[in-house]
Amino acid sequence: MRILRNHLFVLALTALGLGACTGKYIRATNLEKVDSTPERLARGSYLVNQSASCGACHSTRVDGSIFGGERTDMFLAGGTVIHEAELGATLAVPNLTPDVETGLGAWSDDEILRAMRDGIARDGHLLIPMMPFTSYQYMSDEDARSVIAYLRSVPPVKNPVDRTKNDLPFFAGFMLNRGVAHHPPAKDVAPVASPSKGGDTLKWGEYVARLGHCWECHSDKSGHGPDPDWMFGGGNPINANGTGRVFPRNLTPDAETGIGRYTDAQLKTALRDGKRLDGKIMAPPMSLFIPHISGLTDEDLDALIAYLRAQKPIKNKVPERELTPAAKKALGVDS
């Protein structure tokens, strides 16, 4: 089942409900209304637009193509439909704007928080872990409030999303609908503090990695999710919307098959420019995130790279991507 969860994270798009919820995952929604302050709006903008790369999934894409850019007039308005061939899954992306009818405008602040960190929708159904709540459960209370304040501030867009398009293989839907990917709600009841940004660099780098949900794609070739014995060792193949088979890379410091072959400067350049270390343009899903994570501060990127350097080296030669002719043409590459 964790293999399914890993694949769904790789799509990196949105949380989508599957049906009735098992009640033990529901916690009370009693968060006080979040006050909007200049500090929270600034931090929330950074978290949504850089750290968490929300628009990579939730903003409507030009021509509806995975290779198209994000439409500024449909910022966070959802609507993209993802077809994942490896899973045999079809998933539609919801609207995060404050539109009352089709977005989050009718949601309470705590209902948004619960969806982000517990994976529970407003009506109580369990969300598919394509929404990385298993990572966002570690988002600090103040950062979560900043995200909510910022989402309330973006222009509302009326864009109804047809969730009847959602389709998962029977067993996957059956298991997910029973909470196999969900954590106990007590994790969100207790206060969640942020590590000190000026303190332990590795702790801060871990926090940056969680906010960016890096392990969701790059961890685990055998389906164990954030297993410490396979953290960041390379992911399962992704084949979404005609891209072809793309294999998330090995981000461990192994000198032969991981990032141990490269300098910090080379890694930062790759994350800023969206080009692989062999000079080729990155393919989806990573290319969807580059416009966002390229805007991370030097401090956050340096801490993230330091954290990855500190992981257990795993020798795992990841296969080369197998792009479709259409993907090669869109990316301007021959392989």
Image (cartoon, grey):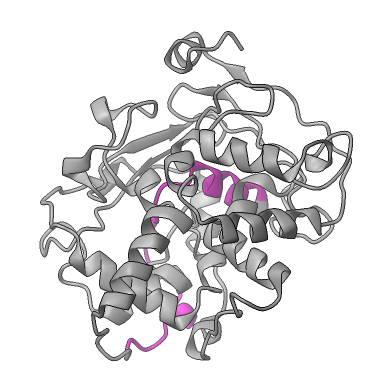
Of residue 327 and residue 267, the one placed in the foreground of this image is 267
Quadrant position of residue 34: bottom left
Image quarter of residue 141: bottom left
Residue 284 horizontal/vertical position (percent):
50, 31
Residue positioned 39% across, 61% down in the render: 46
Residue at point 49%, 34% (across, down): 287
Residue 24's place in the image compared with 118, above or below, is below
Is residue 246 shown in magenta?
no
First to last magenta residue range: 3-29
* Residue 181 can be seen in this image: no
Q: Is residue 9 magenta?
A: yes
- Quarter of the image where the C terminus is located: top right
- Which residue is found at the position 80% from the left and 39% from the top? 258
Q: Nearer the viewer, residue 24 or 8?
A: 8
Q: Position of residue 217 (x, y in %)?
A: 61, 46
265 in relation to 226, above or below: above
Left or right: where does residue 142 sit relative to residue 300? left
> In the shown orientation, is residue 19 left or right of residue 276?
left
Residue 62 visible somewhere in the drawing: yes
Nearest to the observer: residue 94 or residue 290: 290
